[in-house]
Amino acid sequence: MGRQTIIRKSRKIIHLLITGKVLLIPVLFLFFVTGCKVSYSFSGASISPEVKTVSVKYFPNRARIINPALSQEFTDALMDKIKSQTNLVFVDDGDVSFDGEIVDYKTSFLAVTGDDKSAMTRFTISIKVRFTNNVDEDQDFDQVFSRYKDYDATKDLSEVEDALVEAIITDIVEDVFNQAFVNW
């Protein structure tokens, strides 16, 4: 089949579609598009339609070093993430629930220089999370999520602590949310 024949047949099909003489293809296309239910989420969350409610309990700080604001900051950040990425309704005893505790909050020295001083310090937060899915128990988990950030050892933790805590909480909340709701 030559190029000219292909062009003629393509033009004929386009003409038939434009003039409405061939309605079967567009009608079938619309039927399939509207007849199928597809759920998309910008967050990537894949939540069962049976799950309608969520509960998030306060995460107490059980670490050896206590940051008095950390429990509330983490609990609020997790709730904010769920509110912004899902349509779940917050209740006391939800279809899915989160609880746990902060288990570690520490610094450790890295990269010792030639004069026996540390060049970098690692700041780590670890949070134990229990996720219960009352609709699908196979989704339950009990896991410690840990993240760290490194900072210049010449700085005192109090100089960088707020920014590091915020960044680590953001990372851990993302990890917890993905473990609970993103099923790739």
Image (cartoon, grey):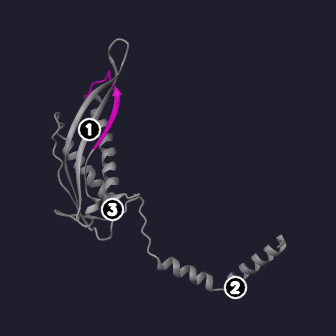
Q: In the image, what residue type sits under mark 1?
A: Ile
> Mark 3 to mark 2: distance in Å?
45 Å
Asked if the stretch drawn in magenta spans residue 149, the answer is yes
Kindly identify which residue carries mark 1: 125
- The residue pinned by badge 2 equals 19
Q: Residue 76 location in percent, x, y?
A: 24, 50
Q: Which residue is mark 3?
A: 86
Residue ranking furthest to the front: 138
Quarter of the rendering containing residue 141 = bottom left
Residue at 32 percent across and 16 percent down: it is 117
Position above or below: 51 against 21: above
Image quadrant of residue 93? bottom left
Rounded to the nearest angstrom, the CA distance separating label 1 from label 2 is 66 Å
Magenta part mainly helix, strand or loop? strand
Q: Residue at x 33, y 40 (%)?
A: 167
The quarter in which the C terminus is drawn is bottom left
- Which numbered disc flags the more N-terminal residue, 3 or 2? 2
Residue range highlighted in magenta? 145-157
